[in-house]
């Protein structure tokens, strides 16, 4: 499809969807971002929608600066997936017990573990670096020092909202029906606490007093505030990655108990709320992806739809106009409140037919109809990624 420039911005804002289809609030946010003096450029993904401070589905390249709101409060949120040796023929007709086993092994919603995870007791989990990782907790913002026990007990837990665990089947191709395991989660409460504390600090800095939106406050390179944010940011991004790794390993154990013959390929993992140091056109920039994945040439990524529509494993094309990025999912087309007012549990049952999942009022805000059409989103970014595998879920666990 290619991009369309968004008119009326100082820095280039390139849009991978119809600019006129972007909600007014989100378009205003994008223009505010494009007006910031530190911004090198912005790439807007086809799943774009309004967010706090910075738009969800935006990729922002800044020179010598970073905006915590352009990362979001769920630092390091992202996806992990692994292909198994199982096929649809191996699965029983009733997938309810498998869903129950997953929910029993991995805490969801506000729940946490009784004790911290011992990596040595989780088969298939990366063993390196755990002691150093937890030692570095003591270097984080002192205002979160009392949260270490909670952070340890929440590691390996799903959370709520749009986070999920799924069992999926490949659609079409030579391996039609191959089973995949997939999950979506982030840095849990500790990431949120760190993000909100740094956002508050940024809003109070003198160079941010005249911004079009105070939530777009930035830290500047070479300042103690920037150093402190980056220290906490890198740690929270690692927490999110390790959180997903623990859950994927535990999920693998659950499936192995039900299907002892199962084998696993190498896992795929990608952040979609994070910061990376990158270089474009000879300029070193800090790239924030808020609701976007890295899609460098050959990079494998994961783009989910909704709890009834399926997902995609993709390979990046390395499009530098988009700062080597792609969408992180379908993107919401209505708020959670609007979804609850629009749809009923009967609608949810219809739209998730054939999927073993919750169908109660507590997840109506996650109904597929509240999201954009994932097939249209994928069509709009054919120059950003190529589809490797199309997946359709048969089990979906929600928080």
Image (tube, rainbow, N blue to C red):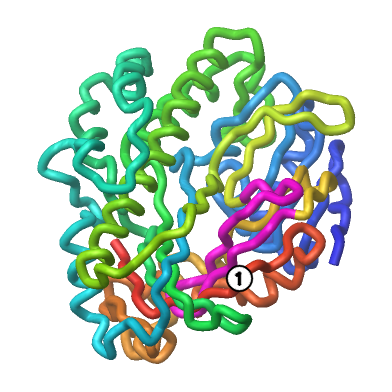
Residue at position x 89%, y 31% in the image = 281
In the picture, the quarter occupied by the C terminus is: bottom left
Q: Is residue 28 visible?
A: no
Residue 257 coordinates in the image, percent (x, y): 20, 66
Vertical comparison of 74 with 356: above or below: above
Vertical comparison of 211 with 52: above or below: above
Going by the picture, which residue comes out furthest to the front? Answer: 261
Quadrant of the image occupied by residue 126 = top left
SS at mark 1? strand
Residue at position x 23%, y 62% in the image = 254
In the rendered image, residue 219 lying in the magenta stretch gets the answer: no
Vertical comparison of 216 with 361: above or below: above
Name the residue carrying label 1. Answer: 389
In the picture, the quarter occupied by the N terminus is: bottom right
Q: Is residue 212 left or right of residue 200?
A: right
Bounds of the magenta segment:
293-316
Q: Is residue 11 left or right of residue 292?
A: right
Residue at position x 32%, y 84% in the image = 345
In the rendered image, residue 311 lying in the magenta stretch gets the answer: yes
Residue 305 coordinates in the image, percent (x, y): 54, 70
Residue 277 coordinates in the image, percent (x, y): 67, 28
Crowding near pointer 1: few (<14 within 10 Å), some, many (20+)? some
Residue at position x 74%, y 34% in the image = 61
Residue 97 coordinates in the image, percent (x, y): 18, 77
How many labels, in total? 1
Going by the picture, which residue comes out furthest to the left? Answer: 114
């Amino acid at each position: 499809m290619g991009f369309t420039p968004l008119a009326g911005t100082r820095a280039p804002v390139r849009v991978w969807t119809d600019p006129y289809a972007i909600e007014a609030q989100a378009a205003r946010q994008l223009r505010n971002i494009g007006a910031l003096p530190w911004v090198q450029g912005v790439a807007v993904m086809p799943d774009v929608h309004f967010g706090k401070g910075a738009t969800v589905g935006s990729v922002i390249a800044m020179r010598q600066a970073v905006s915590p709101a352009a990362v979001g409060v769920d630092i390091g949120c992202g996806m992990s997936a692994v292909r198994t040796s199982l096929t649809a023929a191996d699965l029983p007709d009733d997938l309810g017990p498998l869903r129950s086993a997953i929910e029993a092994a991995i805490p969801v919603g506000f729940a946490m573990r009784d004790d911290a995870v011992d990596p040595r007791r989780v088969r298939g989990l990366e063993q390196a670096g755990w002691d150093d990782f937890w030692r570095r907790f003591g270097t984080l913002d002192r205002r979160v020092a009392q949260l270490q026990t909670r952070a340890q007990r929440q590691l390996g837990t799903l959370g709520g909202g749009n986070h999920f665990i799924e069992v999926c089947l490949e659609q079409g191709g030579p391996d039609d029906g191959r089973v995949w395991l997939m999950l979506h989660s982030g840095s849990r409460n500790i990431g949120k606490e760190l993000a909100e504390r740094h956002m508050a600090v940024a809003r109070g800095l003198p160079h941010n007093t005249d911004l079009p939106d105070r939530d777009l406050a930035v830290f500047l390179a070479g300042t103690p505030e920037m150093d402190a944010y980056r220290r906490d940011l890198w740690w929270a991004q690692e927490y999110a990655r390790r959180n997903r790794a623990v859950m994927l390993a535990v999920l693998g154990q659950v499936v192995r108990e039900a299907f002892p013959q199962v084998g696993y390929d190498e896992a795929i993992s990608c952040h979609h709320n994070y910061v990376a140091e990158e270089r474009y056109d000879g300029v070193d920039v800090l790239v924030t992806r808020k609701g976007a994945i890295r899609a460098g040439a050959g990079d494998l990524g994961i783009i989910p739809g909704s709890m009834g529509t399926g997902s995609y494993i993709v390979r990046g094309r390395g499009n530098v106009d988009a700062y080597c990025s792609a969408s992180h999912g379908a993107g919401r087309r209505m708020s959670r409140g609007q979804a609850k007012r629009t749809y009923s549990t009967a609608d949810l049952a219809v739209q998730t037919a054939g999927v073993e999942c919750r169908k109660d009022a507590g997840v109506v805000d996650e109904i597929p109809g509240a999201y954009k059409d994932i097939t249209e989103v994928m069509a709009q970014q054919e120059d950003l990624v190529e589809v490797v595998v199309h997946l359709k879920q048969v089990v979906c666990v929600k928080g």
